[in-house]
Image (tube, rainbow, N blue to C red):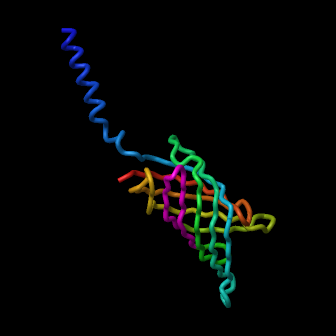
C-alpha cells in the first residue's frame, strides 16, 4: 500500500513539474509605474501668423519606478519622444515611450490631450492624459502586446511627472 501511495504521489509531482500551467508559461498581467522625466532636447515653434498656435518637439529621459505588484521594468531607463500641436497650451500630443533594462526593452505608442489652466497667481499649470499601446519589445519582451492609460503634470518648464498603468502579455 505504501508503494502504491508513493507511486501516485510521484506521478502527481511529475505531472505538476512536466506540465506547468499556462499562467506560469506566459509572462504578463497588470502593470503600473511612474517616472520623473527631464527634457534632454526641447523645441517649440510658434506658427507664423497663427497667434497662439505652437508645435512642440521634445525628448525626455528619466528612470521608471514600478508602482504595481510585480517588478516589471523597475529602475529601467525611460526615454520619451514627443510632439504636441497646441493652441494656447491645449491640444493633442503623441509620441513613443521606451523603457530599457538589462538588455530588454519595450516601446509604447501613446496619444492624448494636453490641458493648461491659469493658477490664481497667473502661472500656467499644465497636465496631460491619454492612452498607450505597445508596438515593440526586445529580449524577453520580444512579442509584447498590451495597452493602458497615462496621466501627468509639469513640475517646471523642463520637467514633468507621468503615471501609467495597463496590462501586457507576450505572444
Q: Residue 101: percent from the left, percent from the top?
A: 54, 51
Q: Is residue 1 magenta?
A: no
The image shows residue 17 at horizontal and vertical percentages of 30, 31
Q: Is residue 156 above or below residue 70?
A: below
Q: Is 24 left or right of 60, judged from the image as shown?
A: left
Picture quarter containing residue 25? top left
Chain part drawn in magenta? 92-111
The verdict on residue 107 being magenta is: yes
Give the side of residue 36 with respect to residue 31, left or right.
right
Identity of the residue drawn at 57% across and 62% down: 129
Which residue is nearer to you in this view: 142 or 128? 142
Residue name at image x 72 percent, y 59 percent: 155
Q: Residue furthest front?
A: 103
What kind of secondary structure does the magenta stretch mostly adopt? Answer: strand
Residue 163 horizontal side relative to residue 166, left or right = right
Q: In front here: 112 or 57?
A: 57
Amino acid at each position: 500500500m505504501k508503494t502504491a501511495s508513493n507511486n501516485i504521489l510521484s506521478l502527481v509531482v511529475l505531472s505538476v513539474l512536466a506540465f506547468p500551467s499556462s499562467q506560469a508559461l506566459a509572462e504578463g498581467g497588470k502593470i503600473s509605474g511612474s517616472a520623473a522625466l527631464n527634457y534632454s532636447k526641447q523645441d517649440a515653434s510658434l506658427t507664423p501668423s497663427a497667434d497662439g498656435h505652437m508645435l512642440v518637439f521634445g525628448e525626455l529621459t528619466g528612470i521608471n519606478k514600478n508602482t504595481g505588484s510585480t517588478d516589471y521594468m523597475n529602475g529601467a531607463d525611460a526615454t520619451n519622444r514627443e510632439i504636441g500641436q497646441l493652441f494656447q497650451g491645449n491640444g493633442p500630443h503623441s509620441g513613443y515611450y521606451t523603457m530599457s533594462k538589462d538588455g530588454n526593452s519595450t516601446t509604447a505608442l501613446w496619444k492624448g490631450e494636453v490641458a493648461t489652466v491659469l493658477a490664481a497667481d497667473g502661472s500656467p499649470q499644465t497636465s496631460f492624459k491619454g492612452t498607450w499601446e505597445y508596438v515593440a519589445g526586445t529580449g524577453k519582451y520580444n512579442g509584447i502586446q498590451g495597452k493602458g492609460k497615462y496621466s501627468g503634470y509639469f513640475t517646471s518648464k523642463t520637467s514633468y511627472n507621468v503615471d501609467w498603468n495597463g496590462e501586457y502579455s507576450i505572444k
